[in-house]
Amino acid sequence: MTERGWRLDTPVEVLNGVGPALSRGLHRLGIATIGDLLNHYPRRWEDYSATKKIAALKPGLVTLKAEVLGVQARRSFKRKLTVSEAILGDDSGTVRAVWFNQPYIATQLKEGQSYFFSGKFEFKNNHLSIQNPSFEPADDQSSVSSKILPIYPENAQINSRLLRKLIAQVIRLTDRLKDGLPDHIAREQGYESHARAIAQLHQPSSMRELELAQDRLAFSELFMLSVSGLALRRELEAETSVAIPFKLETVNAFLDQLSFHLTSAQKRAAWTVFKDIERTSPMNRLIEGDVGSGKTMVAVLAAAMAAQAGVQTAIMVPTEILARQHFKSIERYLRPLGVKVDLLVGALARKERVAAQQRLAAGETQVVIGTQALIGDTTQFHRLGLVVVDEQHRFGVAQRRALRAKADIMPHLLSMTATPIPRSLALVIYGDLDVSIINELPPGRQPIQTKLVDPSHRAKVYGEIDKQITQGRQVYVVCPAISASDHSGRKSVEIEYDKLRKGQFVHRRIGMLHGRMKAEEKESVMADFASGKLDMLIATSVIEVGVDVPNATVMMIEGADRFGLAALHQLRGRVGRGEHQSFCYLVSESEHDEALNRLRSLERTNDGFRLAQIDLELRGPGEVYGVKQHGLDLRLSGIVDPELIKRARAAAESFLATEKVVEYPLIAARVEELKSVTSLD
Ligand code: ADP
Ligand code: MG
């Protein structure tokens, strides 16, 4: 096939230089066709357009073009590291570059060749040197005029340099790429074509042009998503739910038996929910609130209201442990009001389960708490009017939809999450959801003291733990793996359990908990821990979600660098739930500054929203919010820019008000696609 015949769906194997090995590497990156290649967006860019002479370098981030005069790798025994060093020179002088724990650098840099380097120029160990610079061969520049070089998601076979060369062969085909943003809206917003934006990603002509291009692509994504969300919301509003009237007596009876007052944020959220469910158009609300902010109360109040109106409530939670805990506490709150609460989880003995299902189907049960067993084939409801999904980020959309589909008429839906998504972003991601935020913790909570611990200081932590146990407190130790064979180098529950039980804590009562244990075993271990029969629980992150044991005051996390900030914050939220000062110890095996800095942000703040923001900046929204399933293309940084989100939503609203979606096939297709993903009905 000649170059002229190439199309977007032409396989990449026609390109110059793509043999069987590269072909496999490309496929592993998800690149099969020329179109895939053009849609392989860079992760970031390196700006080599403003290089400095060595003699003129000042401390800080620097970019230079220099020749490698010498390069070597050595081991530093004191710090257990490999150090790679290179001497770089240009016509103004020489400078040292240093890389830690990257032994392969010495084989990648060729003496006598010129490269662009970009890194931090600073004092370390009494020398000024460039720390961990990235680099690009300077001779490559002849083929590509741009000095702003895209860095792509790579793998062992395929690096960015190669991708740049391949993309240069097909860059003119960007003209055939289209997105759904109508031309007239792009023009109104001052954007050029989609094709030009994609070309700029791969071969930026300036940083300014690149920013505009990213903006254009992010805007288009946000616009499409907003149109879909708004369209779905309209459809939902046309459905009918049972109106659940507000009764002040119910609220009062409920509040009277509590030993505490609701926070104003809880009251606000509950009030909004009452307003929602009073109407016949289905509620579709997400409550976001930090760990321990008391989201359950809001759900229970809504359930009490539903029960008094004669409709059932189903509360779905992600784990069995959590279901049982919720069942206990919710039943304690609701029984005095005469509300019948029941539990439905997979691990119930068959006879018990069948009995629970019968009570539910007969309408005897007013509030049922359960796991996925709630959406099982054999489960039937009776006037299901309210669905609550706790820790909703743990559930797939399909599961939420299945639960809702169990009702004869569309139930109201209340979702709750501790994953703090900025409100503006939540509005786009969950286009058809209303969002309430509980931004306040119950009073009197002492902030948890968090410490990053070097593995060599583990013994000291054990000492602190032992003191706590002596004072009658309880302790969690979380490990990233279940057994030693899982992954090399990770601390495992089984090994630590054995070690601590026979060693340091031989005089203490220790239990273990992980996902491979039988349901009854898990349950009895958790019950023992909750009732104080165990001093220490060694567990995987199965305890991350929701577990509530107020007497536990220490959370020790092994291999902390292997968890995201949000997960660590959730784990930490298992302590600090009672009156006692609580502690969180993060043990990290990683020596990478980046990983350690990330963990230090947990030392500095207990605020989940703040941590989410930090995580967002460090790892990007895809990792943090796990929102890939919502169809949002998160490769573009602008996607979380509140100003851009607002502009896109406004454009989407006026588009829907004046135009017909069916006349825009790409938008219509996207709405259909998103409907199957985000729709909760
Ligand atoms: P989360 O938002 O993480 O789901 P929970 O609903 O589990 O939080 O509540 C955490 C703990 O705080 C529970 O033990 C609950 O009884 C308690 N709690 C809830 N609201 C209040 C309040 N207003 N004052 C004091 N304690 C509260
Ligand atoms: Mg909760």
Image (tube, grey):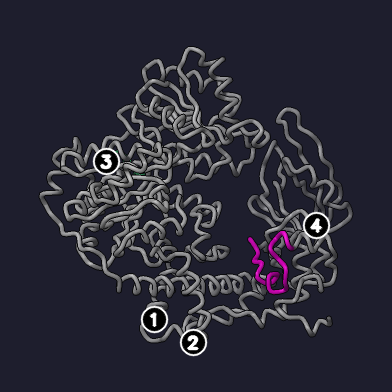
Counting from the top left corner in percent of width and height, residue 3 is at: 81, 81
* Residue for badge 4: 66
State the extent of the magenta-drawn residues as a range. 27-44
Q: Nearer the viewer, residue 641 or 334?
A: 334
Q: Is residue 83 left or right of residue 574?
A: right
Quadrant housing residue 115: bottom right
Type of amino acid at the residue the image marks with label 4? Ala
* Residue for badge 2: 184
- Report if the beta carbon of the residue with label 2 is closer than 8 angstroms to ligand 1: no
Instruction: Tell me the CA gap for discs 3 and 2.
Output: 54 Å
Counting from the top left corner in percent of width and height, residue 459 is at: 55, 20
**Which numbered disc covers residue 656?**
1
Counting from the top left corner in percent of width and height, residue 414 is at: 32, 56
Q: Nearer the viewer, mark 3 or mark 1?
A: 3
Q: Is residue 97 magenta?
A: no
From this view, report whether residue 475 is shown above or below residue 178: above
- Sequence-wise, the earlier of marks 4 and 1 is 4
* Residue for badge 3: 330
- Report if the beta carbon of the residue with label 1 is closer than 8 angstroms to ligand 1: no
